[in-house]
Image (cartoon, rainbow, N blue to C red):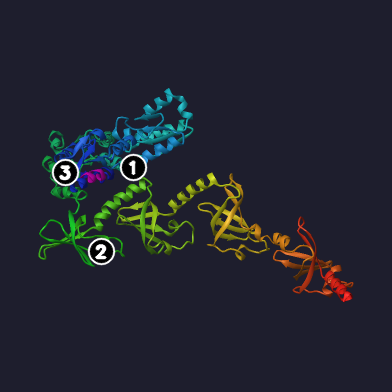
């Protein structure tokens, strides 16, 4: 029985790099690669026959050539040199590798020393170490790591950053990690082994345990292929081969259970060739061997792809020339996953594109094609890599559905749950429809063709960055334009642009109010200033009342002692009545100043709500007290009458 590991063959990063080269060739570009595009001599030879050169340095590129940077990546200075030389280039660095570049650079900025698990002579590791501007250390085994700490005991107390080459041996890394946990007191540890590598090694280990013989197919200079051989050897007789031609020298006869895996740089065509060749090598009495072989090949087969040029567009179909006698057409629903998109908005005559053959009708002379399925194949690879790299993607919200929204990204429908779609619970999902949004992938289920994303995680990250920037520059007295975010019984919270501040209820109005809603509403744009800052706890107290609206300032400027004005009685006491002369200012009419005669109580003359003429007889601005008199006005009137 022959079984092939599900993850055998090209990984996403390698496939992306190879596709980049082929696409440039299809565009009639002259291509060279910075080092072999992958560690597979057969594919490299094939590309060489198509005119693809291998160069060792940017200055080796000839005029008019496009340089492709392979999936291993390069040090930053190589990119800079390409730019300085004016060389056209395409960067096909694997996203997993780019993530390590970022981690290393960020770690150094935080003052951490880089500790990289990997082969210092491997191109990927050379590219990663090229991002280091301070001393670093590399190691390939736990033993080497222990020796580093033995020779440099000070490392145990230093701030360190641990990460690995993407193809590092998973089991060896776990051993190293065990040592790090025991020894290091200030270490940041990142698992940067490519998930495809992890799955590939796990499947190879499981398959080898159930096999009499294991074949590992791949280039002998491929790091991940060599590690696959290491993983399988403890459990089964294991051989590393590059092509089917090497099978003749191997003892495969009589082996009932044979397992096959392949490195990330191994083309599917070579794996197929090995499988077919095995039919002539194995003697078996089982009649269903051909069926077993066909089953093994299934996972490697794909529907036929073609390259087409748009020649005509209708509201329901797009017609393309695919270089065959049959007429090619793409139904509108096979053009894009966006149900609202129109063919004329998506393509134009002369556009070139890769397509998948859906159905051939020789009688009618037509081929039905799909663009959205090709996009989906590429899109799923991008989605999976983006999730592992925690990459921020940008897509368009096309639908609001039950429980969330749908974002379209590279032909893939990504579901964003309501809880992950907006920054605050209760925000309107409909407002997102038709908008371009940034999001992260948080779950991928390829079997169910389901991807789940989060807009909220990106918004939170952006808010966190905005907060850090805000606290760097904010000062007391600084003015801001903000948006009222929420109301409580004791005040209003205002969004100042990523940071919230609070206006206490006493700061909302010069008048007494019972609730902030009497002055502001959620969503209002308000002008505020910083009253005080609590940097330690991240709290901001805001001012909202304007000095010119202060009723005591108005009183001071417009109502001097002696002013006669109307006042409204608002309260009674045994010693007098309080009357409002301005919003926020009540004055006291003492019982002796209510009438020009003796009265027993204020209620004998006044009642709440009466509007009376009063004279301001005294103002104490320090104690915020105003004395009023009705009697003074009555006496003035009596004097005027006597004079008359």
Instruction: Measure how far apart labels 1 and 3 are at the Cα level.
Output: 31 Å
Residue 545's quadrant in the figure? bottom right
Quadrant showing the N terminus? top left
Element on which disc 3 rests? helix
Q: Nearer the viewer, residue 461 or 360?
A: 461
Instruction: Measure how far apart labels 3 and 2 are at the Cα level.
Output: 46 Å
Circle 3 residues within 10 Å: few <14, some 14–19, many ≥20: many
Give residue 96's mark. 1
Q: Position of residue 336 (x, y in %)?
A: 27, 60
For marks 2 and 1 on the same chain, the one whose residue lies earlier in the sequence: 1
Residue 215 seen: no
Give residue 344's mark. 2
Q: Position of residue 147 (x, y in %)?
A: 40, 25
Residue 399's quadrant in the figure? bottom left
Element on which disc 2 rests? helix
Q: Position of residue 19 (x, y in %)?
A: 23, 46
| Residue highlighted by disc 3 | 275
Quadrant showing the C terminus? bottom right
Q: Left or right of 144: which side holds 25?
A: left
Write the residue at 21% across / 46% down.
24
Which range of residues does the magenta coloring cover? 15-21
Q: Nearer the viewer, residue 205 or 400?
A: 400
Write the residue at 37% across / 47% down.
391
Q: Between tags 1 and 3, which lies in front? A: 1
């Amino acid at each position: 029985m022959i079984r092939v590991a599900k993850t055998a063959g090209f990984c996403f990063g390698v496939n992306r790099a190879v596709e980049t080269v082929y696409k440039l060739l299809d565009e009639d570009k002259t291509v060279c690669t910075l080092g072999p595009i992958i560690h597979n001599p057969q594919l490299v030879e094939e590309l060489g026959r198509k005119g693809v050169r291998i160069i060792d340095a940017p200055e080796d590129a000839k005029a008019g050539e496009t340089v492709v940077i392979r999936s291993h990546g390069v040090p930053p200075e190589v990119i800079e040199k390409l730019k300085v030389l004016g060389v056209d280039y395409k960067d096909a660095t694997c996203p997993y590798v780019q993530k390590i570049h970022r981690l290393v650079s960020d770690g150094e900025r935080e003052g951490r020393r880089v500790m990289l698990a990997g082969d210092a002579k491997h191109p990927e590791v050379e590219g990663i170490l090229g991002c280091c501007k301070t001393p670093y250390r590399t190691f390939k085994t736990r033993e080497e790591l222990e020796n580093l700490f033995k020779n440099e005991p000070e490392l145990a107390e230093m701030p360190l950053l641990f990460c690995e080459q993407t193809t590092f041996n998973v089991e060896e890394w776990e051993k190293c990690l065990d040592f790090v946990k025991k020894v290091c007191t200030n270490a940041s540890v990142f698992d940067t082994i490519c998930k495809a590598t992890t799955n590939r090694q796990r499947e190879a280990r499981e398959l080898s345990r159930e096999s009499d013989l294991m074949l590992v197919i791949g280039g002998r200079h491929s790091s991940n292929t060599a590690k696959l051989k290491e993983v399988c050897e403890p459990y089964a007789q294991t051989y590393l081969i590059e092509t089917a031609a090497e099978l003749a020298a191997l003892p495969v006869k009589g082996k009932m259970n044979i397992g096959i895996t392949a490195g990330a740089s191994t083309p599917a065509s070579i794996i197929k060739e090995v499988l077919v060749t095995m039919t002539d090598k194995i003697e078996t009495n089982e009649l269903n061997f051909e069926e077993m072989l066909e089953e093994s090949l299934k996972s490697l087969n794909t529907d036929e792809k073609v390259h087409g040029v748009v020649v005509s567009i209708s509201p329901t179909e797009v017609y393309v020339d695919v270089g065959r006698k049959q007429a090619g057409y793409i139904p509108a629903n096979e053009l894009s996953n966006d149900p609202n998109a129109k063919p004329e908005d998506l393509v134009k005559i002369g556009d070139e594109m890769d397509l998948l053959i859906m159905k051939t009708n020789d009688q009618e002379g037509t081929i039905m094609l799909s663009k959205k399925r090709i996009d989906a194949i590429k899109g799923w690879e991008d989605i999976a890599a983006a999730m592992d790299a925690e990459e921020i993607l940008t897509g368009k919200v096309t639908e609001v559905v039950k429980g969330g929204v749908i974002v379209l990204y590279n032909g893939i429908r990504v579901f964003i749950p309501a809880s992950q779609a907006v920054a605050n619970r209760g925000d309107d999902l409909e407002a997102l429809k038709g908008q371009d949004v940034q999001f992260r992938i948080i779950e991928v289920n390829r079997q169910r063709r389901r991807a789940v994303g989060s807009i909220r995680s990106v918004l939170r990250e952006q808010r966190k960055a905005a907060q850090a920037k805000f606290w760097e520059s904010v000062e007391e007295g600084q003015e801001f334009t903000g948006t009222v975010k929420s109301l409580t019984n004791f005040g209003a919270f205002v969004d100042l642009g990523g940071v919230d501040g609070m206006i206490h209820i006493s700061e909302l109005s010069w008048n007494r109010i019972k609730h902030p809603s009497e002055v502001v509403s959620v969503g209002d744009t308000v002008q505020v200033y910083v009253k005080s800052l609590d940097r330690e706890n991240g709290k901001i107290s805001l001012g909202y009342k304007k000095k010119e609206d202060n009723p005591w300032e108005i009183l001071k400027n417009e109502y001097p002692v002696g002013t006669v004005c109307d006042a409204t009685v608002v309260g009674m006491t045994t010693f007098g009545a309080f009357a409002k002369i301005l919003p926020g200012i009540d004055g006291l009419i003492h019982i002796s100043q209510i009438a020009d005669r003796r009265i027993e109580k204020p209620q004998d003359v006044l009642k709440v709500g009466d509007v009376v003429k009063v004279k301001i007889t005294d103002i104490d601005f320090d104690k915020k007290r105003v004395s009023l008199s009705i009697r003074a006005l009555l006496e003035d009137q009596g004097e005027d009458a006597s004079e008359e």
